[in-house]
């Protein structure tokens, strides 16, 4: 197993993998429809999307965490 100190990297990897997969598939179908080579088109789009998504999530993740902390109320204990 992977050490917990790499949690941010592992989270970013899986989040970007799944989101780029889903979004590239939806956008590929939206743009070209269910054509005979949709899988090939989608896999090419997915590879590109993931190569952008992973470093983007790594860079903007800390900012997003700060924004979430800013907009959420503190719990009353």
Image (cartoon, rainbow, N blue to C red):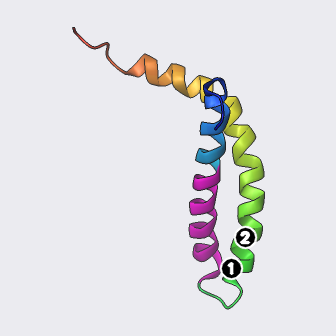
Pick the residue in front: 22 or 28: 22
Q: Is residue 48 magenta?
A: no
Quadrant hosting residue 71: top left
- Answer above or below: position of 49 versus 71: below
In the rendered image, residue 66, in percent from the top left (x then y), is placed at 53, 19
Q: Going by the picture, which residue comes out furthest to the bottom?
A: 36
Label drawn at residue 47: none
Pick the residue in front: 4 or 53: 4
Q: How many marks overall?
A: 2
Quadrant into which the N terminus falls: top right
Residue drawn at point x = 21 percent, y = 8 percent = 77
Quadrant hosting residue 68: top left
Quadrant hosting residue 4: top right
Left or right, residue 22 beside residue 35: left
Residue drawn at point x = 66 percent, y = 35 percent = 2
**Could you give the CA–CA distance between mark 1 and mark 2, rounded to whole angstroms?**
6 Å
> Where is mark 2, residue-wise?
43
Residue drawn at point x = 72 percent, y = 53 percent = 50
| Dominant secondary structure (helix, strand or loop) of the stretch shown in magenta | helix
Kind of element beneath mark 1:
helix
Quick one: label 2, few (<14), some, or many (20+) residues within 10 Å? Answer: some
> Where is mark 1, residue-wise?
39
Q: Are marks 1 and 2 in contact (CB under 8 Å)?
A: yes
In the rendered image, residue 55, in percent from the top left (x then y), is placed at 75, 39
Q: Going by the picture, which residue comes out furthest to the left?
A: 77
Left or right, residue 18 beside residue 69: right
Pick the residue in front: 69 or 16: 16
- Answer above or below: position of 5 versus 28: above
Magenta residues, start to end: 17-33
In the rendered image, residue 52, in percent from the top left (x then y), is placed at 75, 48
Residue drawn at point x = 72 percent, y = 56 percent = 49
């Amino acid at each position: 197993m992977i050490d917990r100190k790499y949690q941010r990297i592992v989270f970013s990897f899986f989040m970007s993998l799944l989101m780029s997969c889903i979004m590239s598939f939806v956008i590929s179908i939206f743009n070209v429809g269910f054509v005979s080579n949709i899988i090939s088109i989608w896999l090419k789009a997915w590879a590109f999307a993931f190569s952008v998504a992973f470093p983007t999530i790594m860079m903007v993740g800390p900012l997003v965490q700060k924004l979430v902390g800013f907009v959420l109320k503190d719990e009353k204990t």
